[in-house]
Image (cartoon, rainbow, N blue to C red):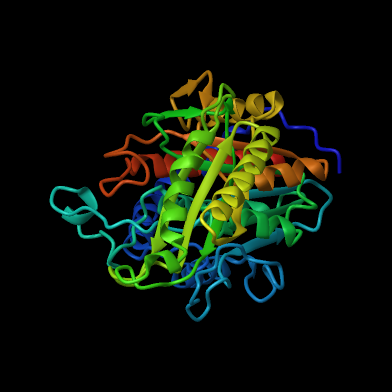
Amino acid sequence: MSLSLPQSQLSGNLLERLRQSVQEEGARLIADRRKFHANPELGWQEIETTAAIVEDLTQTGYRVVSEPAFLGSVPRLGLSEDPIPGEGDTGCIAIYDTGRPGPTVCMRVDIDALPIEEAVGNHAPAAQGFASRKAGLMHACGHDGHAAIGLAVARIVMPLLKGGRGKLKLLFQPAEEGGRGGRAVADAGWMDDVDLFFAIHLGLGVPSDSAAFAVHGILANARYDVHLSGRAAHAGKSPEAGRNALLAACQISLGLHTLAQSSRPGVRLNVGVLKAGKAVNIVPEEATLTFEIRAQNTGDLQALAARCKDFIEATAQAHGVTSTLAPGGGADGHANPDDIVAWAEGINSTTEAFGTVLPDLFFGASEDAATLARRVAACGGRAGIFVLGADLADDHHTPNFDFDERALGKSALLCAGLIASTMGLD
Protein backbone atom coordinates (compact mmCIF):
# COMPACT_ATOMS: atom_id res chain seq x y z
CA MET A 1 0.00 0.00 0.00
CA SER A 2 1.04 3.64 -0.45
CA LEU A 3 1.82 4.99 3.01
CA SER A 4 1.05 8.52 4.07
CA LEU A 5 3.01 9.24 7.23
CA PRO A 6 0.67 10.17 10.07
CA GLN A 7 0.51 13.47 11.88
CA SER A 8 2.40 13.64 15.15
CA GLN A 9 -0.66 13.98 17.35
CA LEU A 10 -1.54 11.15 19.73
CA SER A 11 -4.58 11.36 21.98
CA GLY A 12 -4.10 12.42 25.57
CA ASN A 13 -5.54 9.12 26.75
CA LEU A 14 -3.09 7.13 24.64
CA LEU A 15 -0.13 9.20 25.80
CA GLU A 16 -1.07 8.60 29.40
CA ARG A 17 -1.38 4.86 28.81
CA LEU A 18 1.98 4.71 27.06
CA ARG A 19 3.75 6.67 29.78
CA GLN A 20 2.17 4.56 32.50
CA SER A 21 3.17 1.36 30.73
CA VAL A 22 6.75 2.54 30.33
CA GLN A 23 6.90 3.39 34.02
CA GLU A 24 5.61 -0.07 34.90
CA GLU A 25 8.20 -1.62 32.56
CA GLY A 26 11.12 0.25 34.12
CA ALA A 27 12.51 -2.43 36.42
CA ARG A 28 11.95 -5.23 33.90
CA LEU A 29 13.65 -3.24 31.14
CA ILE A 30 16.81 -2.97 33.21
CA ALA A 31 16.57 -6.60 34.33
CA ASP A 32 16.22 -7.80 30.73
CA ARG A 33 19.14 -5.67 29.58
CA ARG A 34 21.35 -7.01 32.34
CA LYS A 35 20.27 -10.60 31.66
CA PHE A 36 21.31 -10.25 28.02
CA HIS A 37 24.50 -8.42 28.99
CA ALA A 38 25.59 -11.25 31.27
CA ASN A 39 25.01 -13.83 28.53
CA PRO A 40 26.60 -12.43 25.35
CA GLU A 41 26.57 -14.53 22.19
CA LEU A 42 28.29 -13.85 18.88
CA GLY A 43 26.46 -13.37 15.61
CA TRP A 44 24.71 -16.51 14.34
CA GLN A 45 25.31 -18.07 17.79
CA GLU A 46 22.66 -16.15 19.77
CA ILE A 47 20.98 -19.42 20.74
CA GLU A 48 20.08 -18.77 24.37
CA THR A 49 19.28 -15.14 23.59
CA THR A 50 16.86 -16.16 20.84
CA ALA A 51 15.20 -18.78 23.06
CA ALA A 52 14.59 -16.19 25.80
CA ILE A 53 13.18 -13.69 23.29
CA VAL A 54 10.89 -16.25 21.65
CA GLU A 55 9.54 -17.33 25.03
CA ASP A 56 8.83 -13.75 26.10
CA LEU A 57 7.13 -12.79 22.83
CA THR A 58 5.03 -15.95 22.77
CA GLN A 59 3.84 -15.36 26.32
CA THR A 60 2.95 -11.79 25.37
CA GLY A 61 0.65 -13.10 22.65
CA TYR A 62 2.51 -12.70 19.36
CA ARG A 63 2.87 -15.22 16.58
CA VAL A 64 6.61 -15.79 16.60
CA VAL A 65 8.52 -17.14 13.62
CA SER A 66 11.94 -18.64 14.38
CA GLU A 67 13.96 -21.36 12.67
CA PRO A 68 13.45 -23.30 10.52
CA ALA A 69 10.82 -20.94 9.07
CA PHE A 70 12.56 -17.63 9.86
CA LEU A 71 15.49 -17.70 7.42
CA GLY A 72 15.09 -21.21 6.04
CA SER A 73 17.55 -22.01 3.27
CA VAL A 74 18.79 -18.44 2.79
CA PRO A 75 22.64 -18.35 2.83
CA ARG A 76 24.27 -17.15 6.05
CA LEU A 77 27.54 -15.31 5.50
CA GLY A 78 30.29 -15.49 8.07
CA LEU A 79 29.51 -18.73 9.86
CA SER A 80 32.45 -20.01 11.89
CA GLU A 81 34.79 -22.62 10.40
CA ASP A 82 33.66 -25.17 13.00
CA PRO A 83 30.00 -24.25 13.68
CA ILE A 84 28.51 -25.02 17.07
CA PRO A 85 25.16 -26.86 17.23
CA GLY A 86 22.40 -24.42 16.31
CA GLU A 87 24.72 -21.85 14.71
CA GLY A 88 22.93 -19.95 11.98
CA ASP A 89 19.49 -20.80 13.35
CA THR A 90 19.07 -17.67 15.47
CA GLY A 91 16.90 -14.57 15.52
CA CYS A 92 13.14 -14.33 15.12
CA ILE A 93 10.28 -12.10 14.07
CA ALA A 94 7.08 -11.48 16.05
CA ILE A 95 3.92 -10.71 14.10
CA TYR A 96 0.53 -9.31 15.07
CA ASP A 97 -2.09 -8.88 12.35
CA THR A 98 -5.08 -6.78 13.39
CA GLY A 99 -7.14 -8.19 10.52
CA ARG A 100 -8.06 -4.67 9.41
CA PRO A 101 -6.64 -2.84 6.39
CA GLY A 102 -3.66 -0.70 7.22
CA PRO A 103 0.10 -0.42 6.97
CA THR A 104 2.63 -3.09 7.80
CA VAL A 105 5.04 -1.60 10.33
CA CYS A 106 8.37 -3.17 11.27
CA MET A 107 10.61 -2.28 14.20
CA ARG A 108 14.03 -3.89 14.13
CA VAL A 109 16.50 -4.49 16.98
CA ASP A 110 19.76 -6.46 16.90
CA ILE A 111 20.85 -9.04 19.47
CA ASP A 112 24.47 -10.14 18.91
CA ALA A 113 27.60 -9.44 20.97
CA LEU A 114 31.31 -9.01 20.23
CA PRO A 115 34.55 -11.00 20.80
CA ILE A 116 35.85 -8.66 23.52
CA GLU A 117 37.03 -9.45 27.06
CA GLU A 118 34.96 -7.25 29.38
CA ALA A 119 36.71 -4.99 31.88
CA VAL A 120 36.54 -5.62 35.63
CA GLY A 121 37.25 -3.42 38.65
CA ASN A 122 35.24 -0.21 38.64
CA HIS A 123 33.45 -1.12 35.41
CA ALA A 124 29.76 -0.80 36.35
CA PRO A 125 28.53 -4.19 35.04
CA ALA A 126 31.31 -5.92 37.01
CA ALA A 127 30.71 -3.85 40.14
CA GLN A 128 26.94 -4.45 39.98
CA GLY A 129 27.10 -8.15 39.18
CA PHE A 130 25.92 -8.36 35.58
CA ALA A 131 29.20 -8.49 33.67
CA SER A 132 29.71 -11.08 30.96
CA ARG A 133 29.86 -14.65 32.24
CA LYS A 134 31.56 -15.80 29.04
CA ALA A 135 35.30 -15.35 28.63
CA GLY A 136 36.21 -13.26 25.62
CA LEU A 137 32.64 -12.24 24.80
CA MET A 138 30.88 -8.98 25.63
CA HIS A 139 27.92 -6.80 24.73
CA ALA A 140 30.05 -3.78 23.84
CA CYS A 141 27.73 -2.02 21.40
CA GLY A 142 24.39 -1.75 23.21
CA HIS A 143 22.60 -4.63 21.52
CA ASP A 144 21.64 -5.97 24.95
CA GLY A 145 19.75 -2.71 25.45
CA HIS A 146 18.20 -2.88 21.99
CA ALA A 147 16.84 -6.38 22.67
CA ALA A 148 15.39 -5.29 26.02
CA ILE A 149 13.74 -2.27 24.39
CA GLY A 150 12.22 -4.48 21.69
CA LEU A 151 10.66 -6.79 24.26
CA ALA A 152 9.33 -3.87 26.30
CA VAL A 153 7.74 -2.29 23.23
CA ALA A 154 6.14 -5.64 22.38
CA ARG A 155 4.53 -5.75 25.81
CA ILE A 156 3.52 -2.08 25.84
CA VAL A 157 1.67 -2.06 22.51
CA MET A 158 0.06 -5.51 22.74
CA PRO A 159 -3.03 -4.35 24.72
CA LEU A 160 -3.56 -1.60 22.13
CA LEU A 161 -3.17 -3.63 18.95
CA LYS A 162 -6.66 -5.15 18.98
CA GLY A 163 -8.07 -1.69 18.29
CA GLY A 164 -5.55 -0.81 15.60
CA ARG A 165 -5.21 -1.44 11.90
CA GLY A 166 -2.59 -3.11 9.77
CA LYS A 167 0.16 -5.48 10.81
CA LEU A 168 3.09 -5.16 13.22
CA LYS A 169 6.40 -6.97 12.80
CA LEU A 170 9.02 -6.91 15.55
CA LEU A 171 12.32 -8.15 14.16
CA PHE A 172 15.01 -9.44 16.53
CA GLN A 173 17.87 -9.68 14.07
CA PRO A 174 20.93 -11.90 14.48
CA ALA A 175 24.47 -11.20 13.30
CA GLU A 176 24.46 -7.43 12.88
CA GLU A 177 28.18 -7.18 13.55
CA GLY A 178 30.00 -7.72 10.30
CA GLY A 179 26.90 -6.95 8.24
CA ARG A 180 25.62 -10.50 7.90
CA GLY A 181 22.16 -10.92 9.40
CA GLY A 182 20.43 -8.01 7.69
CA ARG A 183 21.15 -9.37 4.23
CA ALA A 184 19.82 -12.81 5.19
CA VAL A 185 16.61 -11.31 6.59
CA ALA A 186 16.13 -9.21 3.46
CA ASP A 187 16.78 -12.20 1.19
CA ALA A 188 14.23 -14.22 3.17
CA GLY A 189 11.55 -11.73 2.09
CA TRP A 190 10.51 -10.37 5.49
CA MET A 191 10.79 -6.75 4.33
CA ASP A 192 8.92 -7.10 1.05
CA ASP A 193 5.49 -6.14 2.44
CA VAL A 194 6.71 -3.54 4.95
CA ASP A 195 5.30 -0.04 4.48
CA LEU A 196 7.18 1.59 7.34
CA PHE A 197 10.45 0.36 8.85
CA PHE A 198 12.50 1.81 11.66
CA ALA A 199 15.55 0.73 13.63
CA ILE A 200 17.29 2.24 16.64
CA HIS A 201 20.81 2.48 18.02
CA LEU A 202 21.77 3.64 21.50
CA GLY A 203 24.68 5.97 22.17
CA LEU A 204 27.08 6.68 19.30
CA GLY A 205 28.13 9.93 20.95
CA VAL A 206 24.61 11.28 21.38
CA PRO A 207 24.22 12.29 25.05
CA SER A 208 21.49 11.13 27.41
CA ASP A 209 18.04 12.70 26.93
CA SER A 210 18.96 13.60 23.35
CA ALA A 211 18.07 11.92 20.07
CA ALA A 212 19.05 12.22 16.43
CA PHE A 213 16.54 11.62 13.65
CA ALA A 214 18.23 13.57 10.81
CA VAL A 215 20.79 10.78 10.51
CA HIS A 216 23.03 10.50 7.45
CA GLY A 217 26.44 9.10 6.64
CA ILE A 218 25.62 5.50 7.50
CA LEU A 219 28.48 3.91 5.58
CA ALA A 220 28.15 1.11 3.08
CA ASN A 221 30.56 -1.67 3.97
CA ALA A 222 31.82 -5.04 2.83
CA ARG A 223 33.87 -7.70 4.58
CA TYR A 224 36.17 -10.18 2.84
CA ASP A 225 38.05 -13.32 3.84
CA VAL A 226 41.34 -13.96 2.03
CA HIS A 227 43.06 -17.36 1.94
CA LEU A 228 46.63 -17.72 0.68
CA SER A 229 48.23 -21.06 -0.20
CA GLY A 230 51.99 -21.44 -0.67
CA ARG A 231 54.41 -24.29 -0.09
CA ALA A 232 56.04 -25.40 3.18
CA ALA A 233 59.80 -25.85 3.46
CA HIS A 234 62.56 -26.14 6.05
CA ALA A 235 63.30 -22.55 7.08
CA GLY A 236 67.02 -23.27 7.62
CA LYS A 237 68.01 -25.98 5.16
CA SER A 238 65.97 -25.04 2.08
CA PRO A 239 63.90 -21.85 2.51
CA GLU A 240 64.16 -21.17 -1.23
CA ALA A 241 61.99 -24.24 -1.84
CA GLY A 242 59.10 -22.70 0.05
CA ARG A 243 56.47 -20.20 -0.93
CA ASN A 244 55.82 -18.03 2.12
CA ALA A 245 52.10 -17.35 2.53
CA LEU A 246 52.72 -15.29 5.68
CA LEU A 247 55.02 -12.83 3.90
CA ALA A 248 52.43 -12.44 1.15
CA ALA A 249 49.73 -11.82 3.76
CA CYS A 250 51.86 -9.19 5.49
CA GLN A 251 52.51 -7.32 2.26
CA ILE A 252 48.84 -7.53 1.35
CA SER A 253 47.83 -6.19 4.77
CA LEU A 254 50.16 -3.19 4.53
CA GLY A 255 49.31 -2.49 0.92
CA LEU A 256 45.55 -2.66 1.40
CA HIS A 257 45.70 0.19 3.89
CA THR A 258 47.33 2.45 1.31
CA LEU A 259 44.40 1.86 -1.04
CA ALA A 260 42.03 3.59 1.39
CA GLN A 261 43.83 6.92 0.99
CA SER A 262 41.12 8.84 -0.83
CA SER A 263 39.54 12.26 -1.10
CA ARG A 264 36.16 10.56 -1.22
CA PRO A 265 34.18 11.00 2.03
CA GLY A 266 33.81 8.08 4.39
CA VAL A 267 36.30 5.74 2.70
CA ARG A 268 37.74 3.34 5.28
CA LEU A 269 39.69 0.06 5.28
CA ASN A 270 40.82 -2.17 8.11
CA VAL A 271 42.62 -5.51 8.21
CA GLY A 272 41.34 -6.94 11.46
CA VAL A 273 42.54 -10.56 11.45
CA LEU A 274 45.71 -12.26 10.16
CA LYS A 275 46.56 -15.89 10.92
CA ALA A 276 49.48 -17.96 9.67
CA GLY A 277 52.25 -20.34 10.62
CA LYS A 278 52.67 -23.53 12.63
CA ALA A 279 56.28 -23.46 13.81
CA VAL A 280 59.23 -21.06 13.78
CA ASN A 281 61.37 -23.33 11.58
CA ILE A 282 58.78 -23.94 8.84
CA VAL A 283 58.07 -21.62 5.92
CA PRO A 284 54.33 -20.88 6.38
CA GLU A 285 52.28 -22.69 3.78
CA GLU A 286 48.87 -21.17 4.59
CA ALA A 287 47.68 -17.74 5.69
CA THR A 288 44.29 -16.14 6.14
CA LEU A 289 43.30 -12.55 6.68
CA THR A 290 40.02 -10.71 7.06
CA PHE A 291 39.45 -7.11 6.08
CA GLU A 292 36.57 -4.70 5.69
CA ILE A 293 36.02 -1.64 3.54
CA ARG A 294 33.57 1.22 4.01
CA ALA A 295 32.39 4.17 1.95
CA GLN A 296 29.60 6.70 2.01
CA ASN A 297 28.06 5.36 -1.18
CA THR A 298 27.90 2.03 -2.95
CA GLY A 299 29.78 3.27 -6.02
CA ASP A 300 32.86 4.24 -3.99
CA LEU A 301 32.65 0.94 -2.12
CA GLN A 302 32.57 -1.09 -5.33
CA ALA A 303 35.50 0.86 -6.78
CA LEU A 304 37.59 0.22 -3.66
CA ALA A 305 36.63 -3.46 -3.66
CA ALA A 306 37.85 -3.84 -7.24
CA ARG A 307 41.20 -2.23 -6.40
CA CYS A 308 41.60 -4.52 -3.38
CA LYS A 309 40.90 -7.60 -5.47
CA ASP A 310 43.45 -6.62 -8.11
CA PHE A 311 46.10 -5.83 -5.48
CA ILE A 312 45.59 -9.11 -3.61
CA GLU A 313 45.87 -11.18 -6.79
CA ALA A 314 48.98 -9.33 -8.00
CA THR A 315 50.74 -9.54 -4.64
CA ALA A 316 49.97 -13.24 -4.27
CA GLN A 317 51.32 -13.89 -7.75
CA ALA A 318 54.52 -11.98 -6.96
CA HIS A 319 55.09 -14.24 -3.94
CA GLY A 320 54.29 -17.41 -5.87
CA VAL A 321 51.22 -18.22 -3.80
CA THR A 322 47.58 -18.63 -4.78
CA SER A 323 44.78 -16.51 -3.36
CA THR A 324 41.04 -16.78 -2.90
CA LEU A 325 38.80 -13.86 -1.93
CA ALA A 326 35.40 -14.64 -0.41
CA PRO A 327 32.70 -12.18 0.73
CA GLY A 328 31.97 -12.36 4.45
CA GLY A 329 29.20 -9.81 4.85
CA GLY A 330 28.28 -6.21 4.20
CA ALA A 331 25.65 -3.51 4.41
CA ASP A 332 24.30 -0.65 2.33
CA GLY A 333 24.65 3.04 3.04
CA HIS A 334 21.70 5.11 4.24
CA ALA A 335 20.46 8.61 5.01
CA ASN A 336 17.02 9.23 6.52
CA PRO A 337 14.51 10.89 4.16
CA ASP A 338 13.14 14.27 5.23
CA ASP A 339 9.58 13.03 5.74
CA ILE A 340 10.77 10.22 8.03
CA VAL A 341 12.79 12.75 10.03
CA ALA A 342 9.81 15.09 10.40
CA TRP A 343 7.51 12.23 11.44
CA ALA A 344 9.88 10.86 14.09
CA GLU A 345 10.70 14.31 15.46
CA GLY A 346 6.98 15.01 15.71
CA ILE A 347 6.30 11.83 17.67
CA ASN A 348 9.23 12.57 19.96
CA SER A 349 7.85 16.05 20.60
CA THR A 350 4.41 14.64 21.37
CA THR A 351 5.63 11.87 23.68
CA GLU A 352 8.39 14.05 25.19
CA ALA A 353 10.57 10.94 25.18
CA PHE A 354 13.84 12.83 24.58
CA GLY A 355 14.25 16.44 25.65
CA THR A 356 16.76 17.49 22.97
CA VAL A 357 16.79 16.71 19.26
CA LEU A 358 20.07 17.06 17.39
CA PRO A 359 19.61 18.95 14.12
CA ASP A 360 21.98 16.65 12.26
CA LEU A 361 24.07 13.52 12.86
CA PHE A 362 26.76 12.01 10.65
CA PHE A 363 26.69 8.33 11.65
CA GLY A 364 30.22 7.62 10.42
CA ALA A 365 29.98 3.84 10.77
CA SER A 366 28.04 0.97 9.24
CA GLU A 367 24.74 -0.52 10.37
CA ASP A 368 23.16 -3.39 8.53
CA ALA A 369 19.68 -2.09 9.26
CA ALA A 370 20.56 -0.02 6.19
CA THR A 371 20.34 -3.18 4.08
CA LEU A 372 16.83 -3.76 5.41
CA ALA A 373 15.95 -0.10 4.84
CA ARG A 374 17.13 -0.34 1.25
CA ARG A 375 15.00 -3.45 0.66
CA VAL A 376 11.94 -1.73 2.16
CA ALA A 377 12.49 1.32 -0.06
CA ALA A 378 12.95 -0.89 -3.14
CA CYS A 379 9.55 -2.42 -2.41
CA GLY A 380 7.87 0.99 -2.09
CA GLY A 381 8.05 1.48 1.68
CA ARG A 382 9.62 4.12 3.92
CA ALA A 383 12.51 3.57 6.34
CA GLY A 384 14.43 5.36 9.07
CA ILE A 385 17.32 4.59 11.42
CA PHE A 386 17.40 6.65 14.63
CA VAL A 387 20.13 7.23 17.21
CA LEU A 388 18.84 7.49 20.78
CA GLY A 389 21.09 9.21 23.27
CA ALA A 390 22.83 7.49 26.16
CA ASP A 391 25.94 8.67 27.95
CA LEU A 392 28.72 6.09 27.60
CA ALA A 393 31.38 4.88 30.03
CA ASP A 394 33.70 4.34 27.05
CA ASP A 395 33.47 4.03 23.29
CA HIS A 396 31.57 1.30 21.47
CA HIS A 397 33.56 -1.90 20.89
CA THR A 398 35.83 -1.37 23.92
CA PRO A 399 36.17 -3.42 27.17
CA ASN A 400 34.82 -0.58 29.35
CA PHE A 401 31.74 0.12 27.25
CA ASP A 402 28.52 0.70 29.18
CA PHE A 403 25.56 3.04 28.69
CA ASP A 404 23.17 5.09 30.78
CA GLU A 405 20.25 2.74 31.45
CA ARG A 406 17.84 5.66 31.78
CA ALA A 407 17.80 5.65 27.98
CA LEU A 408 15.90 2.35 27.96
CA GLY A 409 12.56 3.72 29.11
CA LYS A 410 12.83 6.82 26.92
CA SER A 411 13.55 4.64 23.91
CA ALA A 412 10.65 2.30 24.63
CA LEU A 413 8.27 5.27 24.93
CA LEU A 414 9.39 6.74 21.62
CA CYS A 415 9.21 3.42 19.75
CA ALA A 416 5.78 2.61 21.14
CA GLY A 417 4.64 6.07 20.06
CA LEU A 418 5.98 5.57 16.54
CA ILE A 419 4.06 2.31 16.21
CA ALA A 420 0.89 3.73 17.77
CA SER A 421 0.84 6.74 15.45
CA THR A 422 1.12 4.61 12.33
CA MET A 423 -1.29 1.81 13.24
CA GLY A 424 -4.00 4.03 14.68
CA LEU A 425 -3.70 2.68 18.22
CA ASP A 426 -5.68 4.31 21.01
166 vs 397, nearest the viewer: 397
Task: Name the spot of residue 354 as percent of width and height, x first.
Answer: 45, 29
Q: Which residue occupies 66% across, 33% down? A: 300
Task: Name the spot of residue 323 as percent of width and height, x first.
Answer: 58, 60
Q: Judge whether 53 appears above or below 103 on screen.
A: below
Image quarter of the N terminus: top right
Q: Judge whether 76 appears above or below 118 on screen.
A: below
Left or right of 141: which side holds 218?
A: right
Image quarter of the C terminus: top right
| Res 113 quadrant in image | bottom left
Q: Would you say residue 159 is visible in this rendering?
A: no
| Res 23 quadrant in image | top left
Task: Name the spot of residue 422 as percent of width and height, x first.
Answer: 70, 40
Q: Which residue occupies 71% across, 67% down? A: 74
Left or right of 256: which side holds 182?
A: right
124 vs 363, nearest the viewer: 363
Q: Which residue occupies 55% across, 42% down? A: 293
Q: Would you say residue 83 is visible in this rendering?
A: yes
